[in-house]
Image: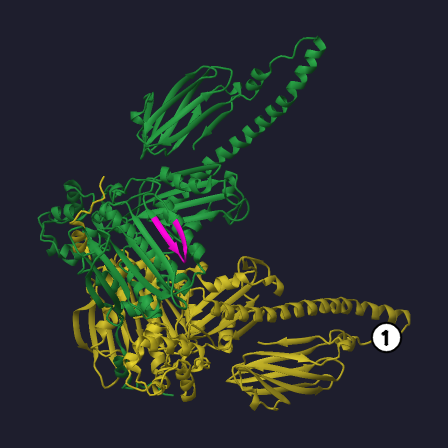
Chain colours: A yellow, B green
Amino acid sequence: MTNAPKPAHADELAKQQRSISVAEFFEKNKHLLGFDSPTRGIVTTVKEAIDNSLDACEEAGFLPDIYLGIFRMNGDIFKVVVEDNGPGIVPENIPFVFGKLLYGSRFHQIRQSRGQQGIGISAAVLYAQLTSGRPTLVISRCGSDRAAFQFRIQIKTEQNEPEILEQKETSWDRIHGTRIEIEFKSSLTAKKRLVEYLRYTSVVNPHARIRVELDGEAILFDRASNEPIIPPQAILPHPHGVELGELKRIAAGSKEPLSSFLVNNFSRVGLKTAGEMIQTAGLKPELVARKLNAENLASLQAAMQQVKVPPPPANQCLSPIGEGLIKQGLEKEFEFDFCSARSRPAAVYHGHPFIIEAALGYGGKLEAEGNARIMRFANRVPLMFQQGACTITGCISGINWRTYGISQSGLPTGPVLILVHVASTNVPFTSESKDAIASIPEIEREITLALQDLGRDLKTFLSRRDRSRLSEERARAICAIIPDIAAKVAETIEKPVPDISPIEGQIMRRLVAKKRTENGMVTVSVQNYTPHALDLTLYIITTDTIGTSRPPPFFTEEIGEERSGVWQVNLPAGEGWQVTYPGLGAGIIDIRGIDEKKKVVVDLDHT
Amino acid sequence: MTNAPKPAHADELAKQQRSISVAEFFEKNKHLLGFDSPTRGIVTTVKEAIDNSLDACEEAGFLPDIYLGIFRMNGDIFKVVVEDNGPGIVPENIPFVFGKLLYGSRFHQIRQSRGQQGIGISAAVLYAQLTSGRPTLVISRCGSDRAAFQFRIQIKTEQNEPEILEQKETSWDRIHGTRIEIEFKSSLTAKKRLVEYLRYTSVVNPHARIRVELDGEAILFDRASNEPIIPPQAILPHPHGVELGELKRIAAGSKEPLSSFLVNNFSRVGLKTAGEMIQTAGLKPELVARKLNAENLASLQAAMQQVKVPPPPANQCLSPIGEGLIKQGLEKEFEFDFCSARSRPAAVYHGHPFIIEAALGYGGKLEAEGNARIMRFANRVPLMFQQGACTITGCISGINWRTYGISQSGLPTGPVLILVHVASTNVPFTSESKDAIASIPEIEREITLALQDLGRDLKTFLSRRDRSRLSEERARAICAIIPDIAAKVAETIEKPVPDISPIEGQIMRRLVAKKRTENGMVTVSVQNYTPHALDLTLYIITTDTIGTSRPPPFFTEEIGEERSGVWQVNLPAGEGWQVTYPGLGAGIIDIRGIDEKKKVVVDLDHT
């Protein structure tokens, strides 16, 4: 054997080298986009289409009204129809939106949205033409003064460009919206998963109505709220997340002097901060951005990381669901014995703002045995696959749930539901199929804090329930023998049997606090069923506006996004008291200040 | 609130819609390619560069001789240099190979290779320019009659096109090969992982020499074999894996009549099979492929799935490592008490052929406590991250190891090493970072069968070891008191002390079989240390060519890729016997037919 080069070899190789279109790439690697199998393909297609509809409606400020139809055609070919009342797509762009991968409006915008890459729906079109050989039908209309257009589209795989097989004006009874009909090889083996996806979507999108016609069965997921979501606004990149290459590119396009360049191109940078950065970098403020050389850029980038800058304006670019709506959605479904939710304050990783929301439910309709039910969401989209590979699952397993009175074997077990929602301008998924969130220390920290906080709430509930169960059992045992004792004593001392009901009441003594939410008003009422007058302190901690409550609180305090209000109440025996304020009923109530010696049982009811 | 459309909205959206380049996409989603963090970035960069070098050398039939240098530059900038003796890249293609994502020679070829997508190394160039702002240096030369060329390249992210900053002829002392120098922000926190990657690479590429200069330290991973790998050959697509869309595309480019179209464009289809397909589809054989209409194509595709076709020619397009080389590589490193390896017969998923190889090591230098050590490989590349998300790990956890005498808590525990290699024309990774293999039932089945088989080997070893330990301990105890007894007896009967050594030998009786491999020749020798003549049957099961052994076997049989040979040997007390044949020493030896009553201890030594 000789190691001498075969001179022709590099030339032979050269002939084989060529450019691969992104459509070819994803056709070959379709499992990366969630098209592993026909069974899974249908869930992915429905998910991509509904994500797009929800995003479009939200951006336009409409309450989403979505129709989903799934029909078995001949053999193993299924047709999926999704129709929305969104703003529509102008006809010139339709072929690209559906017939070209990596085409979209949200990729360069820094704000929360379901779809970002412009891959999802065109991947479904690609999967359809690959498995059924059929083009996708799209109808869209942009308003009452515009015509509706109908297209038949497929993708030229080698070029990743749309191929228009039909394009015509059509009549359509929708004034604005988009309809897509897509046919591919599939099966309904994953029907349960599909319905679960729709139910979960409805939980975190209470403003959406989704009508479903699924292989002959009709299901309605109606809206639970009539408030359209305030669409998140795009923000500028944050200086702490900017890499050198990115800075170089932004600077190359700017004729401004350094200080206005920094102020106009980055989030949270004012003139003062800009000046500090320029000074730290050792540059002159009048330098024009695009004239910076490699060395200047490197020192400016380093300075941008060093100078303190407030975190990105998360409230503007993110759209968390809110504790109240999460609880409302879950309780409708599961009728828990206990439920608590948390929205954490906004945090940042690699310059991307994010908010973690979590909820913990206990009892109710949940199964008493087996692993906890885990509901994972990213930007209001349920994550249906690869639970094991997701950092949310990792964080849940990493917590010592026994501390909070829950049994555990890896995951917590028993009648427990855990919901985690990651809202971010850039959710770090482990793959394009967007099934699982990658392990990012900043995100893991926030998830863990939220869950520990909820664990503490549950522990309080469980120990209170145990305590009150115990004293109730004792009281019941006593009440059961009182009539006998009274009769026996009366017989012995030859008097009539006394009325024992006040004694019973005294033994079963209770102070009951209830919270009710109706028509946007929250009422917290307290009833003293005990025989004593009680001096108590009522605490309400909530994101609702308790400042305007009637009666007004004795004292309020802001803790991050939440406010805590305090009322002092003197409540004679047998009497009641209440406070009302506008809001959604999020947060918790607590009663303190009652003399321990009186052994008053406090019932807190958050329904 | 009104739901009337804002007529301008669709137009506003339209303005924001635009095409996203694949470079922009992966710059934003760099974690998908294994560039999550500077720490990990260095492992990914080294891996991509070395994968390319190994692939290039293999294709040209050279024994790889690779140099890797890692140098700390100023601050947190590191320079990675990789130089190989591959066939080189012609200068016209260099900018595209390194400066354009999705450009390569292996994407459309159906055969085993490390790199496939043409993404890896250009992603490293992209990561370099993003974090350090510096272009990548490439030098390449295609033979003694060609000049060497030097380039400085970066990527125009918005277009995914190369930008050539420098291009010139240069002098280079290599006759053929490629050198790349790439600078990016990193750290050496993952140094241990990096060395592990190189060691594992060396285990499954025993034909490669890798010289390393790592931050001032020199390490040599020398080659263990001087046989270059026979490069796998590309095959045609298999009819059972063809989707309708793909068939449509292939047919559109063919002017042939149906039967020759099928024979010339698909693997394993002869005229007879083609005829059967055409008949099943109800078509006429003289129909020209590109004139097939949608309906014809659908019925042809269905027929192609129905008609029986032999599996794809795996031996031609795959390059498994081989049981012998796997064991050799592992034993060099770990000095096991026991090691066994299996190459499974080729199998198929979705029309892609694959071969599973696995090895199980026990004892030696392995840690006695904790989880088993798992080594995962795909197409001879070690998988270093996301062990938990990989189907290999899932299969290992799914086996009941206690059956084979190994303790288990999820993963098996104790001094155990498990190696699994998936070789395929299309390895189904869970993401482009190529860290973990997706869950595919056909692949899982093969992995499980291989591991169960190895588990049985280990069980035999463990129970034999326990049995032989027991009888050895007994024999030792007897031998220890024999001199005293002999002396005492001699004293009593007043005779001289007898020579007790033949008795000792009889008590410690042994039949020892050994296997040695040297210079491509395997010698299996059997030595009878017992006091009896023994009639025994020797079995050798191996992929080596035992047909040509001396002495020739009494009987041989083919079992898939393996052959089993049988020798009958009559061995007088104290004598030895041996057989030699050419090969690598893979497979197992076994001795049977010895009368159980003689209680002969058989030592099988596979070293």
Identified by mark 1, the residue type is Pro
Residue drawn at x 30%, y 85% is: A288
Q: Is residue B440 left or right of residue B137?
A: right
Give yes or no for residue B602 being in the magenta stretch: no
- Residue hosting label 1: A496
Q: Can residue B449 be seen in this view?
A: no
Q: Can residue B496 be seen in this view?
A: yes
Query: Is residue A111 depicted above or below A100 in this figure?
Result: below
Q: Give the range drawn in magenta.
A: B210-219
Q: Where is residue A243 in the image (x, y as percent from the top left)?
A: 37, 73
Query: Is residue A14 depicted above or below A345 in this figure?
Result: above
Q: Position of residue B323 (x, y in %)?
A: 37, 38
Q: Which of A541 and A417 is in front in this view?
A: A541
Give yes or no for residue B214 being in the magenta stretch: yes
Q: Nearer the viewer, residue B137 or A422?
A: B137
Majority secondary structure in the magenta region: strand
